[in-house]
Image: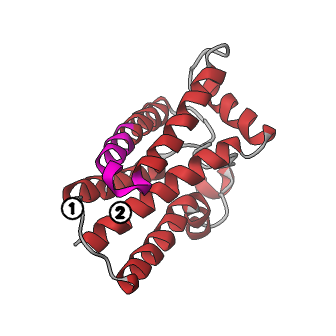
Amino acid sequence: MHYLELSCRALLALVFTVSAAGKARNTASWRSFTRSLTDLGIAARWAPPAAVTVTAAEALTAASLVWAPSARIGYMLAAGMLLIFTTVIWRTVRREATVRCACFGPSGAPMSRRHLFRNGLLLAVTAGGWALARPGGAHEAAGVAIALGAAFTAGMLVVRFDDLAALVAGPPRTRRESAR
């Protein structure tokens, strides 16, 4: 079971690392993220410090998950962050506001129910990893390689979730096509 926990930890560390890096990648990404915070209702003067706080918390979460002795702290941080993000997305969807998801950097995809689904899956991974986390234990190289490979694959599916959802859904319909 410790290989499954390692996969959970690695998947979450990857997702939070890519999320923080996507926001801080360059000036345009940072501005896009800060603008998305104002679109969510944060006052313009508070958006830059909020952006720093969110990005730093994501980086801290990822770092906490990398090192096994701090994994429990990392899982708690991940759960807290995901619950906050899910609440914000839920409120945005409920208000029927069009706010671009800046989860992994600039995006054209507005926040929607599919983001709630994605975060629900990440919360399940977090809960599973927390439940399986045990200190110590020996790991064989082959098991570690498989666990990390699975985590990387799943993590990339999470990071590219909007693109995959758009691919499956097909091109957006015009109002005329939707009325038929």
Name the foreground residue: 143 vs 38. 143
At a point 63% along the width and 40% down the height, the residue shown is 100
Above or below 108: residue 149? below
The residue under the point 45% across, 32% down is: 88
Q: Position of residue 120 (x, y in %)?
A: 35, 51
Q: Are marks 2 and 1 in contact (CB under 8 Å)?
A: yes
Badge 1 is on which residue? 132
Residue under the point 49% across and 64% down: 155
Q: Label 2: how many residues lie within 10 Å, few (<14), some (14-19) or many (20+)? A: many
Left or right: 178 with respect to 77?
right
Q: In front: 54, or 90? A: 54
Task: From the top left corner, tell me how far across and down residue 25 is, in percent.
Answer: 73, 46
Please identify the quarter of the rendering in which residue 47 is found.
top right
Q: Which residue is mark 2?
A: 8
The stretch of residues the image draws in magenta is: 65-80
Residue sitting nearer the eye, 80 or 138:
138
| Count of marks overlaid on the render | 2
Q: Magenta stretch mostly in which secondary structure? A: helix
Bin the neighbour count of mark 1 within 10 Å (Cα to Cα): few under 14, some 14-19, many 20 and up. Answer: some
Q: Is residue 77 magenta?
A: yes
Residue at the extreme bottom: 142
Q: Is residue 91 magenta?
A: no
